[in-house]
Amino acid sequence: MTLHLSEVWLSIVYGFGLFILIYMTFVVLFYGLLFFLSAFQLKREEKVDDLEKYEDYMDSSYTKPVSIIVPAFNEELGIKGSIRSLLSINYPEYEIIVVNDGSNDRTAESVIEYFHMTPVKKALQTKLATERVKGIYQSSTSPNLWLVDKFNGGKADALNAGLNVSTYPYFCSLDGDSVLERDAFLKVMKPIIDSDESIIASGGSIRVANGCSIHEGQIEKIGLSKNPIVIMQVIEYLRAFLMGRIGLSRYNWLLIISGAFGVFSKKWVIDAGGYKRDTVGEDMELVVRLQRLIKDRKTDKKIVYVPDPVCWTEAPESATYLRRQRSRWHRGLFESLWIHKKMLLNPKYGSIGMISLPYFWLIELAGPVVELCGYLFVLLSFFLGGIYTEMAILFFLLSILYSAISSMGAVILEEWSLRKYPAVKDIVTLFIYSLTETIWYRPLTVLWRCEGLIHAVTGRKGWGEMKRKGISGGLEQ
Amino acid sequence: MFSLEIMVLAITSILLISTLTIMFIYLVIKKMMEMALEKRINEYKVRINGPLYQYLHYQTESHLLIPQNSVQSAALERSLSEYSAVVQGETKRRITVLADEIFNRQFKRDLQNKRFSKRINVLYKIDSFQMHSLKHILKQMLHDEKVTKEEKLIIFRCLANSSDQDIHTFLKNSQLSFSILEFRSVLNRMDEEFFRENTIHFADYPLNLQLGLIDMIGIRKDLDNLFFLEQLLTSSTFEIRIRAMKAIGEISYLSDTSSLQQFARSPQWEERMMAAKVIGKTRIHGGLDMLDELIEDTSWLVRSQSAQSYLSYSEGKDRLRQVSTLSKDPFARDMAIEWLERGENHDIAFE
């Protein structure tokens, strides 16, 4: 009897191991496919002369005006630099709306003083419900700069308040502590302008700013941080943007435009109901909702990703903050998918329902859980020996294959296409680090993402604090 | 049991990692070589800076301006590109002459290149130098089905640069679905006289080109085409009417105000908003009375535009102040107050 039970148990472990291996093989193949899709697309765009391509778009009669909404919560350190950098971007017509979301520090006061702002009465085109607005200010030195001071209601609420105040047909959401390249707006708007409005949202790339030298809100020299955790994040960002999004965007399967840098058609976002409060993944949730609206209205509108325009943002430098961020991201992913669970495998939503969403559920959301099980299996195999050790070795090899394709591949794609890093040394460092991912970084992020999933299921709320250094550089002269 | 799988996977991993590493090493070596090349190009650019300036401004010729190798050619090409973005008139014409002379053969070869990026970059150069000498080949490319839409757009721009009469025929028969803005980028390159010829062909053009043409008349503030625009105000196509009205706003003149009345009473808010805008731009007689109605419109955008238009009349501010206190519509009062405040704070300049 005892023998029989242990046999059953062992065959369960065997089946479990087999499942993990099949799953991993599938993931490796999928990433392989994405790599080729992206490589193909990037090859085509290779080395097209930038300056010439955008020259025509600097004429203000060509472009569409954009409202840039910057939600700020306790961003006293970085906000002035960010605004300065925004005031100097290369775009014919835009307004900047900083939304102070009930900060506890002097975010609002410092902006009001520094940019000589005065309170104004603005007839609001109120469309979205938000927490109460305390006041609206306009800068007397730069009349296209506004500040909305409101009670705290979270990032989504702040963005909605900004939307209500905005006057232009397109808006861009931008994180308070990030730095845009000067031509980033022209580049991210180009697909929208070219398409005669058939593209309703367009997102650019996000890169890690740590290690770059930034002065007065302008990137002066692109460099690489020496902190291993930051270097691994650089690789992760390359992978997420150069592989994942290019592949998904090509067939209009995109479900994420990063909250840090994306342009949306205001009309569509308002029709969709604005940003959803009480979710930590408001950026992804909105894009899923827009895709849903596109399909519900049976239009052929599109959401695209453009690799070239880059927004540089500060990445967490310590494991503590990185853990909070990853856990939060995964919770956000779960919430966005859960809210729209009815779209999953629903033929009405076309390729979004049949391909995109299954991909996000199976690979992005469930991936860490399966991988964690894989690690547990490896531990277990030490005790069981025999065939289980062999399965553990297979699992390890598959992990190596995965990280080779995804991380080394991403570094290669970067060097092949955008080439943002001027120093050979930096690129070599990135490549060597990408080899080590499986051994230390991957298991850590897997753990954190599983933690996020647990938080999501148990209903934990809130953002967790992010410690900022203020990357935008000193303003003192 | 799994030893075979382990073998296969191990070999695959080693192979894949080696392939990726080789690719990487190749890219790094290429990067280093390109950086070295870049340095040489930049050095030569500095060397020809003086002679190029002399040629462009005083037509002093120099042997340095005849490239002997690819580095010199690339340096000259870039310097010319930089110049052509900032100069006008006679200097620009000299750039064209120089480019036609020096790059003709090289560009002809590059246009046949298999790589898309190579071809498109050459087309950008031909456009920015406004070269004429390659016209014949470009027209042949328009007939070629393998040439992409992106390339054809730039070819249209190049033909527009050189006022080539055949462009009208190509535009009429083009099966390609260019956007309005893309068509505008073609029209934008035509000189005044050549641009006017377009109105003759208007009826035969595809809709997006028609719309782009209307926009362009507005952008150029082409008073000679005002009558043409006014005729279009009665078009049955909504997009044509609204864009024609917008273009009239840009010209800031209207010979017949009755159409404005019609727009102000249109069931579509876009037309009412455009009416409010054009009243402000043209400051027509009796416009303020029309604005009094429009500022009480149901649409926020119409109200906002109307309030803004008041301020372009000399007595507009007083009239808007009346609205802010006397109007029965609370939304109209709010809007009036906002624009009165804005006008006082910043003396907003009107386009």
Image (cartoon, coloured by chain):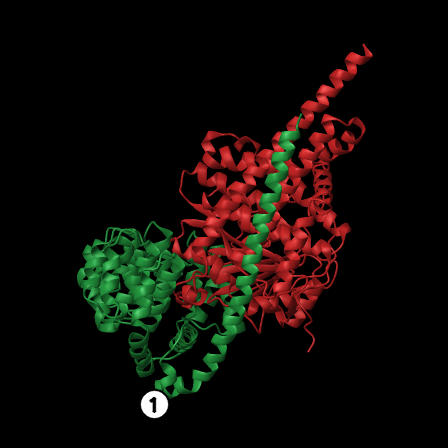
Chain given the colour green:
B
Q: Residue B225: image x %, image y %?
A: 23, 68
Residue B304 visible in the current orientation: yes
Q: Nearer the viewer, residue A276 or A324?
A: A324
Q: Is residue B190 above or below residue B241?
A: below
Tell me the shade of chain A: red
Quarter containing the N terminus of chain A: top right
Q: Residue at x 47, y 53 (%)?
A: A42
Q: Residue at x 19, y 63 (%)?
A: B166
The residue to which callout 1 is attached is: B58
Query: Which residue type carries mark 1?
Result: Tyr
Q: Residue furthest top?
A: A1
Q: Is residue B20 above or below residue A372?
A: below
Q: Residue A33: image x %, image y %?
A: 51, 41
Q: Quadrant of residue A52?
A: bottom left
Residue A119 visible in the current orientation: no
Q: Quadrant of residue A456?
A: top right
